[in-house]
Image (spheres, rainbow, N blue to C red):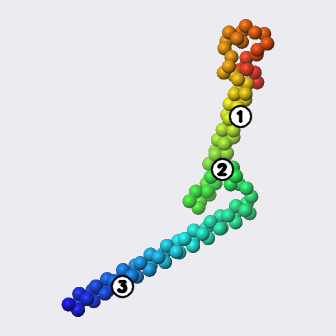
Amino acid sequence: GTEDALLLIALGVSVLIGVFASQLANETWESINEEVEIAKAEKAALEGDDEKDDVMREFMGMDLPQFVVGFQLSLQAADERVNTMIEDEYHAQVWNYTKEELTASNYIMDPATQP
């Protein structure tokens, strides 16, 4: 009887301690995350506008090697060049000419051979 009651009381107390510890851990985790975000924002403000180029320079708190950052920058530059070329060809209407039209007219120059 009394041993069972003491066991139940001990179990109840341990459950309450677990609930309070869980709440405390959750609040601590949230406050740490807020501090980290504030520190990141301050660091970005001090370093300038590196974040505007959408290049990942850090992963899980560690700085990425310079060749990885350079690779990302090269990919972005290549993407911009390809998109510029596509826009230029679209505005030149490269797809709009057939071989017969190009050879029949002296006024139409082949846009695919133009620089």
* Residue 21 as seen in the image, left or right of residue 11: right
Give residue 54's mark: 2
Classify mark 3: residues with Cα within 10 Å, few (<14), some (14-19) or many (20+): few
The residues tagged by marks 2 and 1 sit, at their Cα atoms, a distance apart of 19 Å
In the image, residue 2 sits, relative to residue 46, either above or below, namely below
Of the 4 image quadrants, the one containing the N terminus is bottom left
In the image, residue 6 sits, relative to residue 54, either above or below, namely below
**Residue furthest top as drawn:** 104
**Residue furthest right as drawn:** 107
Residue at numbered disc 1:
84
Q: Residue at x 73, y 62 (%)?
A: 45
Residue contact between numbered discs 1 and 3, judged by CB atoms under 8 Å:
no
Residue at numbered disc 3:
13
Q: Residue at x 32, y 86 (%)?
A: 10
User: At numbered mark 1, what does the secondary structure look like: helix, strand or loop?
Assistant: helix
Nearest the viewer among 55 and 5 is 5
In the image, residue 51 sits, relative to residue 77, either above or below, namely below
Amino acid, disc 2: Asp
User: At numbered mark 2, what does the secondary structure look like: helix, strand or loop?
Assistant: loop
